[in-house]
Image (cartoon, rainbow, N blue to C red):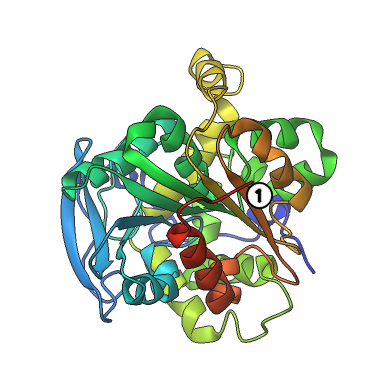
């Protein structure tokens, strides 16, 4: 298993400063929406629309009727990563909604607002905009980080919490700072701290690095994921102007704020325990977020907490083992009394 380190975001050759691989600062800070169409609004049994929340506009795909399940994608993906779960949830009697996070897919690219507290307010704002009093949040990777945050900040809006491939924010911070193995596994985050170069490298050669990261982070159990068609979808979505910059900004905040008052305040705020039933899912062979880093997150939950490890699976359990993941998810959501 090859783990991409920060050198993946180091100098790899010249990038065309006039081409799409080198977004300008004004373009990255534009507040306009991404170009709608094939890269984002992919056809299927779901419907697409935009909703307003927290001062921005967010693209969502929705399917089914019943209790709301809001799905939050991670990096370097967008709402489409939940395509398997959306149909399974709808068939099971849920209203499945997958949203594009701020700056990604069909959602607004704003000049600021990429700190986790504000991104979590995006999520809870979408719940309100959908006319619901609460939702079960399901988040993967960065989406999982925001799901943890939303459950702490707005617990009345979170009915249940499901996190995949991401430890609790305090656990993530401590692991990145004190666990050399996790710091090395997550060295792409350190590489993101360089100005502009990571964006250019993400977009070089039709976003080839996006495909490489997904391939490197996937486990060996399911060789059919990712196939070339799937990688092409993610590469085209990342190539929408300003997406690369906006996708990296949350990780820049997570590192650069560690010694700043806003970061210290956020870390203290996350001491508040999660008080909603929580399902924590992880791939046993995840090379980007180590199992040991995630496994200690239960200490921050004062509610029924269930840990589930997917054997032989990497960083994308919901795509590498969609049937197993969906089955685990739905059974837990339907369980009236999930126990520890």
| Residue 235 screen position, x and y as percent | 46, 71
Which residue is label 1 attached to? Answer: 188
Quarter-wise, where is residue 281 in the image?
bottom right
Is there any visible trace of residue 236 in the rendered image? Answer: no
| Residue 29, position as x, y percentages in the image | 30, 40
Left or right relative to 154: residue 35: left
Q: Position of residue 80 (x, y in %)?
A: 39, 69
Residue plotted at (38% across, 51% down)? 136
Does dot 1 land on a helix, a strand or a loop? helix
**Residue in the picture at 26% in, 53% down:** 107
Q: Position of residue 231 (x, y in %)?
A: 51, 77
- Decide which of 107, 301 is in the foreground and name it: 301
Residue located farthest toward the right when viewing the structure as drawn: 180
Count the marks: 1
Q: Is residue 24 left or right of residue 304?
A: left
Classify residue 90 as left or right of residue 85.
Answer: left
Q: Nearer the viewer, residue 13 or 32?
A: 32
């Amino acid at each position: 298993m090859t783990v991409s380190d920060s050198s993946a975001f180091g100098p790899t050759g010249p990038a065309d400063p006039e081409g799409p691989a080198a977004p300008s600062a004004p373009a990255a800070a534009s507040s306009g929406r991404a170009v709608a169409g094939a890269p984002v609004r992919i056809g299927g049994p779901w419907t697409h629309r935009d909703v307003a929340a927290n001062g921005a506009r967010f693209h969502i795909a929705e399917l089914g009727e019943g209790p709301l399940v809001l799905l939050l994608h991670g990096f370097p993906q967008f709402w489409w990563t939940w395509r398997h779960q959306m149909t399974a949830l709808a068939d099971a009697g849920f209203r499945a909604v997958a949203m594009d996070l701020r700056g990604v897919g069909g959602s607004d690219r704003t000049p600021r607002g990429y700190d986790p507290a504000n991104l979590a307010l995006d999520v809870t704002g979408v719940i309100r905009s959908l006319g619901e009093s609460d939702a079960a949040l399901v988040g993967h990777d960065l989406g999982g980080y925001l799901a943890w945050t939303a459950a702490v900040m707005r617990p009345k809006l979170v009915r249940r919490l499901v996190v995949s491939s991401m430890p609790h924010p305090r656990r993530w911070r401590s692991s990145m700072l004190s666990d050399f193995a996790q710091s090395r596994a997550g060295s792409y985050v350190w590489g993101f701290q360089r100005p502009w170069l990571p964006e250019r490298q993400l977009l070089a050669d039709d976003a080839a690095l996006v495909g490489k990261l997904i391939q490197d982070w996937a486990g060996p159990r399911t060789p059919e994921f990712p196939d070339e068609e799937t990688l092409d979808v993610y590469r085209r979505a990342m190539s929408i102007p300003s997406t690369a910059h906006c996708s990296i900004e949350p990780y820049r905040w997570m590192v650069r704020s560690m010694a700043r008052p806003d970061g210290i305040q956020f870390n203290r705020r996350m001491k508040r325990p999660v008080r909603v039933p929580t399902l924590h899912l992880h791939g046993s062979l995840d090379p980007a977020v180590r199992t040991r880093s995630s496994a200690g997150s239960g200490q921050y939950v004062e509610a029924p907490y269930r840990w589930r490890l997917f054997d032989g699976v990497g960083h994308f359990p919901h795509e590498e083992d969609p049937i197993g993941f969906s089955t685990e998810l739905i059974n837990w959501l339907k369980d009236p009394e999930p126990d520890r």
